[in-house]
């Protein structure tokens, strides 16, 4: 055996793999991780698990060391943005350590299950078991965790090659792809460790009849098939284009100007902004944008009457604009009449209606399903209204709009309650650190891709990022405070049909992941003999030029 293999897998196996796990997981558990470090971390764990988790005497020790290494790396990677997450730094640290410890235990437990259970499977179920297990784990965690997908080991960046699957399979697809690549790499490392021997897996006897052998995929051919699937799934991203639409009004494009109202503290000379400050800032850009949005909890109202009066003041200055007013409201118990409870909401206010077009309260505080309001746009200057909307009543174009607030975007299942697809989602937010702001922006961007819509994200926190996500837009518009306006193009007529992911829900991709594992039980009559290396070599030889015969030199 090669000396390098002896050093890695025998002499210093614990030291090397624990250090690799710590290094890779410190990158994988950043607030905005990419796919590569997550894949490398899982690859390291799978290789180490295959070597060590079968020995019952030391498995508990090995699992404990891995859990500790991952938990410490995760806590250090997220320490800086987490210190101010709660009212006390000490409590923030305790919560951070607790969450990283729980996710570390779950990760090692999944690797352990794969090591102990998959070894008894045939080749194809063996290599597809871990991706299904991995994607199912984080699907469940995103439901039960108080911070949704923020607590999952899911790539926030670097998944562009498989981003086209988001409207069809949602975030579960990204997790499955990560798990599948980890299996491919770990199997490749295992082959290198064995010295490249071309031997079949133990579960299939080489002396089996040919009729039986050809009805199963061998370990090598199963790995080849999985790798081929991963490469094929990446091809559409190279062929499909996702660029923003033009912003010039036409028969098939509706230009829509949107803006964030983010008053800078320096201009208003005080840190706690008032309702008057936001109204004054809105006046400056109300003629430039059809939709304006205030950041999360921009103003506070102490009663329902005060809320109604405040919205009436905003309605007076909303000339030509729909203003999304985000607020914190003190409300009382309708039975006892006592107050003391608070909730965060957003109301869409315009001069076209005395009452708000839409009122939405933060889903994680008040379980009110989101609804959709329809805003009608008149023809722009220079365009005849009969050409603008010839088939619409009053010759106006309808724009379906809804709203959601900050942390809600970490829960993909929230939007399953929508009965149709909105053209625009207003998303006020308020984060406390630029790393957290960037993390939430990535969540917003993923929800926009999954729903096939655009999201106006306005973050009023220190160092927060703001912009338009979806519709070909992937980068945020700015960092920090300062109001801005942007014009985007929406296709006309806009299709309100829901995406497959929104219509079918998150359980559908989980079902498909396990169907890949269990499907071989129902495929015993499928002839797999054509998919092997020997036949692939035969196909390759068909395209080779025949050798040129050498002349007789005698």
Image (tube, rainbow, N blue to C red):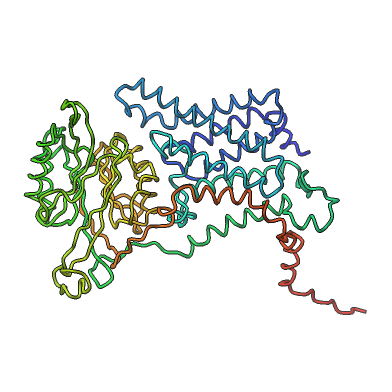
- Image quadrant occupied by the N terminus: top right
Which residue: 79% across, 55% down? 213
Query: Is residue 132 found left or right of 80 in the rendered image?
Result: right
Q: Residue furthest right?
A: 554
Report the quarter where the C terminus lies: bottom right
Report the residue at 72% width, 45% height from top: 191
- Rendered location of residue 49, percent (x, y): 65, 34
Given residues 124 and 8, the one toward you in this image is 124
Residue 295 lies left or right of residue 319; in this view the side is: right
The residue depicted at 40 percent of the width and 28 percent of the height is 79
| Residue that lies at the very extreme toward the front in this rendered image | 335
Q: Quadrant of residue 214?
A: bottom right
154 to the left or right of 287: right
Position of residue 395 in the picture relative to residue 123 (left or right): left
From this viewpoint, which residue is outermost toward the top?
A: 90
Quadrant housing residue 9: top right
In the rendered view, would you say 87 is above or below 205? above
Q: Is residue 250 above or below residue 95?
A: below
């Amino acid at each position: 055996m090669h000396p390098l293999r002896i050093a890695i897998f025998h002499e210093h196996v614990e030291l090397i793999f624990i250090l690799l796990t710590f290094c890779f997981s410190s990158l994988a558990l950043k607030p905005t991780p990419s796919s590569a470090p997550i894949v490398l971390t899982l690859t390291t764990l799978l290789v180490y698990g295959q070597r060590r988790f079968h020995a019952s005497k030391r498995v508990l020790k090995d699992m404990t060391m891995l859990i500790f290494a991952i938990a410490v790396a995760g806590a250090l990677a997220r320490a800086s943005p987490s210190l101010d997450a709660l009212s006390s730094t000490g409590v923030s640290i305790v919560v951070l350590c607790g969450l990283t410890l729980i996710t570390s235990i779950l990760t090692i437990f999944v690797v352990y299950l794969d090591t102990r259970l998959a070894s008894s499977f045939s080749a194809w179920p063996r290599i597809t078991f871990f991706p299904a297990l991995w994607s199912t784990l984080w699907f469940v965690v995103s439901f039960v965790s108080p911070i949704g997908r923020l607590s999952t080991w899911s790539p926030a960046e670097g998944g562009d090659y498989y981003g086209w699957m988001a409207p069809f399979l949602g975030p579960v697809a990204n997790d499955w792809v990560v798990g599948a690549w980890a299996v491919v790499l770990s199997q490749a490392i295992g082959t290198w460790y064995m010295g490249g021997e071309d031997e079949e897996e133990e579960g299939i006897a080489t002396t089996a009849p040919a009729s039986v052998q050809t009805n199963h995929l061998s370990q090598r051919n199963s790995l080849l098939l999985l790798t081929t699937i991963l490469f094929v799934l990446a091809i559409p991203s190279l062929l499909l284009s996702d660029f923003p639409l033009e912003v010039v009004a036409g028969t098939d494009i509706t230009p829509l100007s949107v803006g964030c109202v983010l008053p800078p503290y320096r201009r208003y000379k005080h840190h706690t902004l008032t309702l008057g400050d936001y109204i004054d800032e809105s006046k400056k850009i109300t003629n430039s944008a059809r939709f304006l949005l205030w950041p999360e909890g921009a103003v506070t109202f102490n009663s329902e009457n005060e809320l109604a009066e405040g919205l009436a003041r905003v309605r007076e200055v909303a000339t030509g604009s729909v203003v999304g007013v985000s607020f914190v409201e003190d409300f009382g118990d309708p039975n006892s009449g006592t107050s003391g409870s608070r909730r965060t909401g957003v109301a869409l206010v315009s001069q076209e209606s005395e009452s708000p077009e839409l009122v939405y309260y933060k889903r994680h505080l008040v379980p009110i399903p989101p609804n959709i309001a329809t805003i009608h746009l008149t023809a722009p200057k220079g365009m005849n209204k009969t050409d603008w909307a010839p088939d619409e009543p009053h010759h106006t174009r309808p724009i379906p709009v809804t709203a959601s607030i900050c942390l809600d975007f970490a829960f993909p299942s929230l939007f399953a309650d929508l009965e149709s697809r909105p053209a625009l989602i207003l998303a006020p937010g308020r984060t406390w650190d630029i790393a957290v702001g960037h993390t939430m922006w990535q969540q917003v961007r993923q929800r926009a891709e999954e729903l096939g819509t655009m999201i106006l994200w306005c973050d009023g926190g220190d160092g927060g990022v703001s912009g338009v996500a979806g519709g070909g837009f992937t980068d945020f518009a700015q960092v920090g405070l300062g109001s801005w306006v942007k014009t985007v193009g929406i296709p006309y007529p806009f299709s309100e049909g829901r995406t497959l992911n929104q219509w079918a829900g998150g359980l559908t991709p989980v079902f498909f992941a396990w169907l890949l594992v269990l499907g071989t039980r129902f495929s015993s009559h499928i002839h797999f003999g054509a998919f092997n290396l020997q036949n692939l070599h035969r196909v390759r030889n068909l395209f080779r030029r025949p050798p040129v015969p050498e002349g007789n030199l005698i």
